[in-house]
Amino acid sequence: MTKKEIPKEYDHKKEVIWQKKWQDKNTHKFIGDGTRPRYVIDTPPPYPTGSIHMGHVLNWSYIDMVARYKRLRGYDVLFPQGWDCHGLPTEVKVEETHNIKKNDVSRLEFRDMCVDLTKTNIKLMKNQMKTMGFSQDWSMEYITMTPEYMKRTQYSFLKMYEEGLIYQGIHPVNWCPRCETAIAFAEVEYNSNKTYLNYVKFRALAETDDGYGVVKTDKDDKNSSNMEGGVLIATTRPELMSACVGVVVNPKDERYSDILGKKVEVPLSGQAVEVIADEEVDPNFGTGAVMVCTFGDKTDVTWVNKHNLDIIEPIDPQGKMTKSAGRYEGMDLKECKLQTIDDLKSEGCLIKQEEVDQNVGQCWRCKTPIEILVKKQWFVAVNKLVDDIKEASSDIKWNPKHMESRLLNWVDSMEWDWCISRQRIFATPIPVWYCKECGKVHVAQLHEIPIDPTQKSPTIIDSKKQEKPYICECGSSNFRGEEDVLDTWMDSSISPLSIAGWPKEDYSEKFPADLRPQGHDIIRTWAFYTILRTKALTGLKPFEEIEINGMVFGEDGYKMSKSRGNVIAPDDVIIKYGADALRIWASNSVPGSDVPFDWNDIKYGYKFLRKFWNAFRFISIHIFNDKNDSEKKTDDEINRTVFNDFNLKNSGNLTEILNNHLQPLDKWIISKLNNIVNLASESFESYNFATVINSTQSFVWHDFCDDYIEAVKYRLYSKETDEKAINSKYAAKYTLKTIIETVLKLLNPITPHFADEVYSYFSNETLYWALDKTLDNKIESIENTDWPKVNNDLIDLKAEEEGFKAVNLIAEIRRFKSNSKLPLNTPLSEVNIYFKNEQLFKSLEKFKDDIKGTLKINNLNFKTGKLEIIEKVVEITPAMDKIGPEFKGEAGKILKYLNSISIEKIDNILSNNGKIDIEGNIITNEHLNMKKEVVGSSGKKVEILNPENSDLLIEIYR
């Protein structure tokens, strides 16, 4: 092969060719026949929005690097891809697209619209994933909206229901008025803002024959803040006055000792409520007296349950005030709040307002502030499983380890059970019916699932194994299907079970999964729910390891978001620089940490690939058989080198041959290469991808391209025919080929397109030499090779140390040439290197041929002892700017004298006397321009290099 046959520039647009080849050849298919150890990845199922973002790129690049690395290590890798389809955003998009509301059409028709949109979005995202070179086994794809997957989700519901881990109850729940559905605590985000703390006067009530009456005092004026016989409360939610069911104070707060157990009147709504003692009240916040309403926050729920208080429901599911709110019925919450404050002022009950910071819970989807409403919902009994979750977590390897604390902190903070029912349509139906006569709950049987209970009535299998309608115990056959649906996390939380084929008996062959990769933002949801569910369903942990990635930040330092306008679309990068350059950016990060996007990182990665490509292109003309020049290659030269059988199988003497015949610089870089393989292997195992790419780039760019290739060019082009020269040439060729092939394997998990593109030339061409004729040289992909093995016998730290000194010495003289404006291939007539210690002399003496050949030095000498040099004056001219003004008319005499004697004599007189007396005119060095040059012991002009931190001096004769 000639260099001309390999394109001059690396073309990243050829990435699509490799993507198609991988798909056509099923290169990444999971076999599952047990002939290789299995490695199962519990891949995150993203929400099908129709486009992947940089967060997806980061996470899936991590996953793909692990998958490709494990395949090279001999594993049968199951890298599936799932899609977490159900959810509110799809419903909202369907409503926008079709200009309808979900209740404008039948449930079935609306669901079909959601399915169609989801299928379209999945196709778009799937294609984008392929353009990134992600190596999923698409035959193992799963989609949560399919009947097959919904059957698993519903089966898990039935199983947990049977075991008492799922129940239905009437409880306060987090409610989103915008989405009109219950949400779990894990779906509540918190946002800080400013609000007002309102100080409101509650007047005391006295018990009378007719009930309670207001206690009047002389000081009780409606415009006074004096609360003798009453209480002053502080609240940020005055709109919930109508739902006030009590006032709590700390029992140790002496301000309220006289009113404890008594009743006060709630302003505006007028109900009588008791003043209750509770140690949880902070006496230093506000007035120390807190109104309990149903429900302002979680604390209200705790107090209501603790003190067995009444429940008043002032807010409906749409966020409007109910009949219980009295005069405010029909208002939205914001309107009600403003009107309540105005009314409190006019009634003289609002004493003052103070601005305070507030942490408001909001829906993670639509960012609407959540309310707490009392609803009949379905729940998972989380508190029964807390210990199981902690036990499983401790048995999982967390990467990084500190991320486990996020899960444990969340588990310890759980006060409410997981509300799993949602008031939506596009989700897995809850497989339950209610008898229309007696109201009894009937849960589906195994033969009925997957089932939509709103579309079909319950059945049973009779003794003849015939399916027939189910009859309730009360005798009724009329049922109402449950219209609520399951939280989408009920789908995705069984992903490792679904991948394994659960509940089939052989699911344990692929369960637990080996790896769960995910973002730190969903530890309290996906990680938490998955551990909970798999422990509940199988008693086992869901995966062996969990690897956590961070978020992607824009170039402005903020998390990428459309609202900030700092989003970079992956396609924009791929079109310009290719997927591999983007993958290099993703690899240069540490799991668990957030990652900034920087175009300069993309450009550097692309530049690196081009650098490596150019190096390979140069090397190819020396290691591939040149078809146009093959007749000129003599068998004699090849047969005369010990390197002609290096690739033979089971060559037991390989290491011995290498140690005996590799040149010092070959040993230096081969040792470094083995250490890089060691480091890359350890780093991939610990998901430290940044170490892999940084160490490999540094090795290729500097050690290989800048130092080694430049240092062996003279060996490759040598015309010498003696055995030493021939072995030296082929040792260099062996080393070049070994490094290229090895580095390609190290890079394959990170830059698979580039690695396969370069490697394809190895598989499609013939080498001059070292070819094992028994091997199939037509390997279609580097994916079908093995991870490089470390040869510890070739790791030589002394060789590395000495090689480092040698390449630094070469670099020093190359810099001299560059600074002197000399072409690097310019010969130097003589170079003498003076060593200050014997050890350095011996270390570098073995590199003498490489130093001489690389730098094109005609005569290279290594010496010990002192460097003898002198400064020689080669030119003297009068400094007229000094002589003229100082000597004026005498200047002519001075010039005449200086021109009459030699340069050597002038220098000698000045050296001995420090001055020259010319007819009474005293001349010193400052009156002359003197040009000097350094000369060596030979008397020739010499240039001296004194490298920093080095025990040597370099004497150069051009």
Image: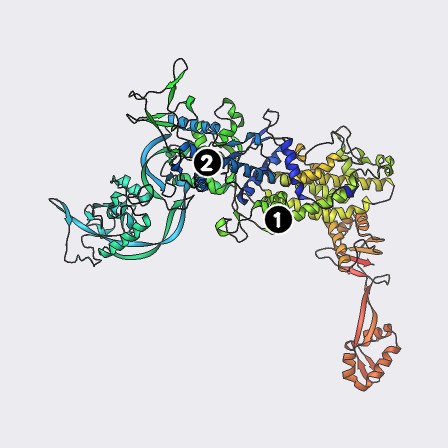
Q: Identify the residue at horizontal 28%, vertical 21% (top origin).
A: 474
Q: Which mark is residue 114?
A: 2
Q: Is residue 242 left or right of residue 890?
A: left
SS category of the residue bearing label 1: helix
**Mark 1–mark 2 CB contact (< 8 Å):** no
Which of the two residues, 911 or 942, is positioned nearer the viewer here? 942
Give the CA distance from mark 1 to mark 2. 37 Å
Q: Could one spot residue 277 in this view of the protein?
A: no
Amino acid at pointer 1: Ile
Which of the two residues, 605 or 699, is positioned nearer the viewer here? 605
Amino acid at pointer 2: Cys
User: Residue 724's image quarter?
Assistant: top right
Q: Identify the residue at horizontal 62%, vertical 25% (top origin).
A: 35
Point out the residue furthest to the top here: 464
Q: Could one spot residue 157 in this view of the protein?
A: yes
- In percent of width and height, residue 849 lies at 81, 48
- In percent of width and height, residue 448 lies at 41, 23
- In percent of width and height, residue 234 lies at 28, 52
SS category of the residue bearing label 2: helix
What colour scheme governs how the chains and residues are painted in the rendered image of this protein? Answer: rainbow
Name the residue beneath numbered marker 1.
602
User: Residue 629's image quarter?
Assistant: top right
> Taking 927 as reference, is 52 above or below it?
above
**Circle 2 crowding by C-alpha within 10 Å: few under 14, some 14–19, many from 20:** many
Which of the two residues, 904 or 839, is positioned nearer the viewer here? 904
Q: Is residue 894 left or right of residue 525?
A: right
> Reading the chain from its start, which is encountered first: label 1 or label 2?
2
